[in-house]
Amino acid sequence: MSTRVLRSHTVYTIAAIGFIFTLHAAIPIYSNSSFLGLFADAQTIGLIYMAGAAVGILGFLIAPILIRRFGNYTMAMLLICVQIAIFYGLISSTSAMTLAILFILQSAVVSIIGLTLDIFLEVYTDDDHVGTVRGLYTATLNASWVVAPLIGSLLINGSDNYRNTYVAALAMLFPLLYLIYRNFPRFEDPKYTHLSLWRLAKHISSNADWMKLFTANVILQTFYSWMVIYSPIYLNKNIGFSWEEIGIILVVMLIPFPLIQYPLGKLADKRFGEKEMMAVGFAIMGISTMFLSLSTLKSVMLWAVLFLITRIGAAIAEIMMETYFFKKVSTRDTSVLSSYRITRPLSYFLAPVVMMLGLLFTDMQNMFVIIGAFSLLALYPALTIRDTN
């Protein structure tokens, strides 16, 4: 892997850009399924998410070609402009078909914008500070996840005003566009490697550690996706919480991400190996998720603490995987990076599948047991992957 120079000012700038970018995506994300529920049934909502995942996967496969052709800066600017148009449509359209199509497109575009930000950050990170920089960046992104549910619940204001969240998301895109325009117009793209789909598949499958990491990430992202799509609906419809109460639960739940990921990233650089902490994270996440099925009490504090414990595990697993991956991949490997990020839209395809299959055998309450057991499957790749230290 090539030697890169750590430029603190630029890293902090990219972290600020990442915060705004994630805030625009996170404000509507927990109410998206409820918004879609205004004009579609639960099965159709699952199909819409699966279609968005399919388009997202296709976008990730095409993105490396477009980035090599036009450059990372141009692609970032173009995609943000496309996202502005999509959110305007989500705010103004009244056609169920149009809204479904726009929702599918925005879920794909947001993922590829995130890929361009990954490339910006990777270029300005040296090999000795990967954990520290990734910890800072991931913690900053996740800080936006902490405030976004509260903002979203306040905008919905106890009714069906879900479009207000899209207005806020649209507003975030303009400072995002300006900051990238202001800071990266002369960005020098690295010499990206080109791999066909067949060669890329062979390249990744030839590395057992990459395959294990990809598997663990699919499991983590599927856990996130299932929780994003279905847990707010469960808390609202089954337990009886208002959206304001759900917002409080989600804010408390997400606190571990900005608090522990940065120091854990530094520890991964200096002291501990990633695999051990990764396994601990998945164990906490899986076991605590299974315990969610035991509670039916309508207590904001209880549910906030229960969800908080699940996210302590998820936060540990996530930052260890991010650190491990970016210690192994260079700035030129856009195809490998894009393939790794495919796990995010792929998870939105898998989560509805897990839900539909699970409900054939049990009810919504016991789905937490299935998702928890599914999460524990990541222990095998986490424990058998070779450490970087």
Image (cartoon, rainbow, N blue to C red):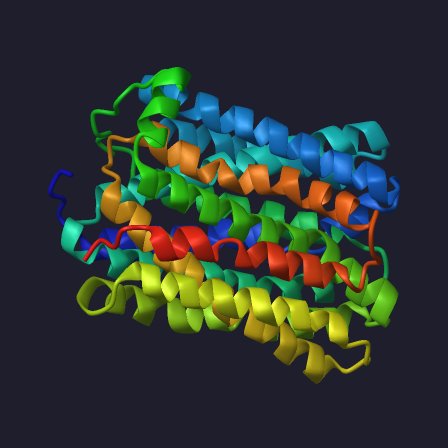
Identify the image quadrant of residue 71.
Answer: top left
Whole-percent x, y for residue 22 in the image? 51, 52
Quadrant where the image shows the N terminus: top left
Q: Residue at x 66, y 67 (%)?
A: 290
For the residue pair 62 and 15, the one nearer the viewer reads as 62
Tell me residue 74's x, y (percent): 37, 27
- Which residue is at a point 18% across and 58% down the rendered structure image? 389
Q: Is residue 43 left or right of residue 348?
A: right
Looking at the picture, does residue 109 appear above or below residue 258? above
Whether residue 223 is visible to the viewer of this picture, yes or no, is yes
Q: What residue is shown at x 31% (from left), y 30% (from top)?
A: 206
Q: Is residue 177 above or below residue 161?
A: above
Seen in the image, is 84 located left or right of residue 36?
left
Front in this rendered view, residue 275 or 58: 275
Give the x, y percent position of residue 227: 66, 57
**At 82% from the left edge and 80% from the top edge, which residue is drawn?**
298
Task: Answer whether residue 29 is visible to the viewer in this image.
Answer: no
Up/down of 237 relative to 210, above or below: below
Q: Relative to 176, say whether 31 is above or below.
A: below
Q: Residue 330 falls in which quadrant of the image?
A: top left
